[in-house]
Image (cartoon, rainbow, N blue to C red):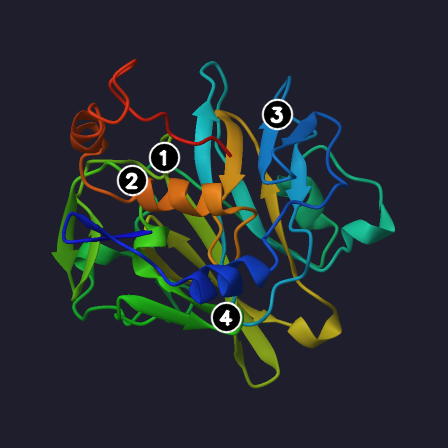
Amino acid sequence: MRVNNGTFDVVSEATLIEVQKMPPTRFHPYHGENIQLFHENLVAYRKTSFAHALTFSEEPLKPGEIFLVEIEKTERGWSGHLRIGLTQFDPRNHFKLPQYALPDLANMGKSWIYAVNKSHNRIFTGNIEIDEDQSTEPYQPVVGNEDLIQTPRGTFSRSLLLPVRFPMERKNGYCIPKKGSILPTDVGSRIGIMYVVNDDRAEMHFIINGLDQGPCAKNIPYQDGPLYAIVDVYGTTKQVRIIQLYGVTSLQNACREIILQMDGWETLSISLRGLYPNNGSLELPRL
């Protein structure tokens, strides 16, 4: 099932089977002591404190592959927010985990980690960080400007990078959240990490709510070892969920993501009252 101009189309059975053959992206079972993983290791929840909340991607990333998480829960009373990046420390080796990604893990070397903040709307040119609104020329994102994004692991819709149920506007040829409608640290915000190769080095990019922030780290020696995504569920960030760009764990989860991308879930609920007279709506499947 897919949505096309507000109506439902049927996706071929072969297409669904092909999508489900692709392995889903998960968190690695080795993580900080305050982390609990749920829903087949797709969701990471910090059960207490604000420390010891490191999580890793289950597999190392390929060049150009995007690892994307959505903030599902926040908790007041803490300072700081989600930290995300890349590391060449292999979680399969069960190395001793520090309390924090920043500065602890970063100081151990072989890691490139940055803190997400409320005003994160910047691109990096060389060693200079500038606000995108002050840039004289439109930044050319590494993911391109097309509606379909092609990566080494597969092709997916750009809409998956966007937060759902927030007003959008078109800028530089593609949709992004309307300015001020959602902060990078808000519930619903989608934060991605990826790296691209330039000769014998790589550069790391943030993608925040569909917007490529530009290279935030350069000269990464990617040939020295596999690069895993690392997420520190730190500070006000309480729970994150991996957004499946390349594979899904079930047809139910695939339909859930499609429904979430629709404009006006309430409208769909009203239209289904005839089919579900007991409660007048269709419960959204949970991950």
Asked if residue 152 lies left or right of residue 149, the reply is right
- SS type, badge 1: loop
Q: Which of 6 and 264 is in front in this view?
A: 6
Q: Is residue 148 visible?
A: yes
Asked if residue 94 lies left or right of residue 157, the reply is right
Q: Mark 2 points at which residue?
A: 164
- SS type, badge 4: loop
Label 4, residues with CA under 10 Å away: few <14, some 14-19, many ≥20: some
Which numbered circle lies on residue 188? 1
Earlier along the polypeptide chain: callout 2 or callout 1? 2
Q: Name the residue under label 4.
A: 64
- SS type, badge 2: loop
**Count of numbered tags:** 4
Q: Which of 274 and 39 is in front in this view?
A: 274
What x and y, as percent, mark residue 278?
A: 29, 13
Earlier along the polypeptide chain: callout 1 or callout 3? 3
